Image: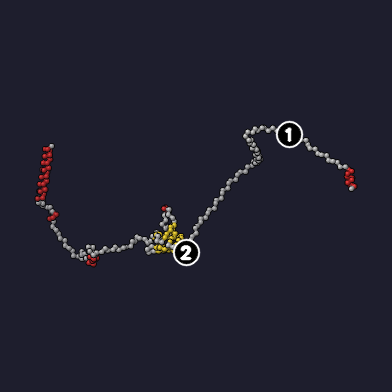
Amino acid sequence: MVKKYYLINLLLILIIAFLVNENYRVRTSPPPAGKETVGSKPRMLVPVSSSPAAKKEKPDPAVFRSVSDKNIFSPNRKEFPIPLTPDPTKKPPVRPNVQLFGVAIDEGFHSAVITNPTRRADKGERETMTVKEGQKVGEYSVAKILPDRITLELSADSFDVLLYDPTKPMKRPVIAPTKPPTPPTPAPPRPVSTTPPRPYTPPAVTSPPVRQPAGTITRPQVPQARTPVPPARRRPVPEIDDDDDDDDDDD
């Protein structure tokens, strides 16, 4: 094993010596004829044209005066305010669509009932809202509450909401016409029977059985034989004598 390592090391030393020799020979040998190096090329001077088109216009010194005036390294420098430019995308405020329903005014208390312009039905908010002075209604705020109106204002805009607006008459609710009830459909006529009706037979009336008290013996009723009753005889009419009739005539 040790001999193998010696052979490998000897081989590596020979390779290194060969490479060093080749490197030294390349560096010290003169360049061959017919080939020029980069550094051996002569430099050519290009004359500068003096035509007016080639001349550049010099900037005015006043342009650079602002740089010297605003020296950022000066100990007395101040922060320059950034000029505010109006935002072209900003839209003017939109007046809220508000309707006044009522006003309550008392000593130190002013409130009004108006429609809720920001109402969301999905959250179950009410259609009306009660506001006081200084309260926000959209982008506007309630400035005044008077007996017949309220005033909403913004920084550069204000408008009144009247309780009774003469230009907007109150609209009566439109009642939808009720549909008349549909008449019932007549039933088809029944066929008339040609057979005569049956005679009416009254139902037989049965007397309820008489309940006997407990402990009594009921005997069967035996029909009693009836004794014949002799016919009643008429009394004879007394006869009137003729003599009595004559006496009466004389008198």
Give the amino acid at mark 1: Arg
Question: Which quadrant of the figure contains the N terminus?
Answer: top left
Label count reads: 2
User: Is the residue marked by circle 2 packed among few (<14), some (14-19), or many (20+) residues within 10 Å?
Assistant: few
Residue 33 horizontal/vertical position (percent): 10, 52
Residue drawn at (43%, 58%) of the image: 130
Position of 174 relative to 225 (above/below):
below
Which tag, 1 or 2, sits closer to the chain's start? 2
The residue nearer to you, when weighing 121 against 7, is 121
- Residue 82 location, quadrant: bottom left
CA distance separating discs 1 and 2: 112 Å
Residue drawn at (82%, 39%) of the image: 235
Residue drawn at (42%, 60%) of the image: 132
Helix, strand or loop at disc 1?
loop
Residue that mark 1 sits on: 226
The residue nearer to you, when weighing 191 against 100, is 100
Helix, strand or loop at disc 2?
loop
- Residue 198 location, quadrant: top right
Residue drawn at (37%, 61%) of the image: 92
Residue that mark 2 sits on: 166
**For this view, does 13 lie left or right of residue 88?**
left
Residue 211 horizontal/vertical position (percent): 63, 36
Q: Look at the numbered discs 1 and 2 and tell me whether their residues touch, using CB distance below 8 Å.
A: no
Does any portion of residue 6 appear in the rendered image? yes
Residue located farthest toward the right when viewing the structure as drawn = 250
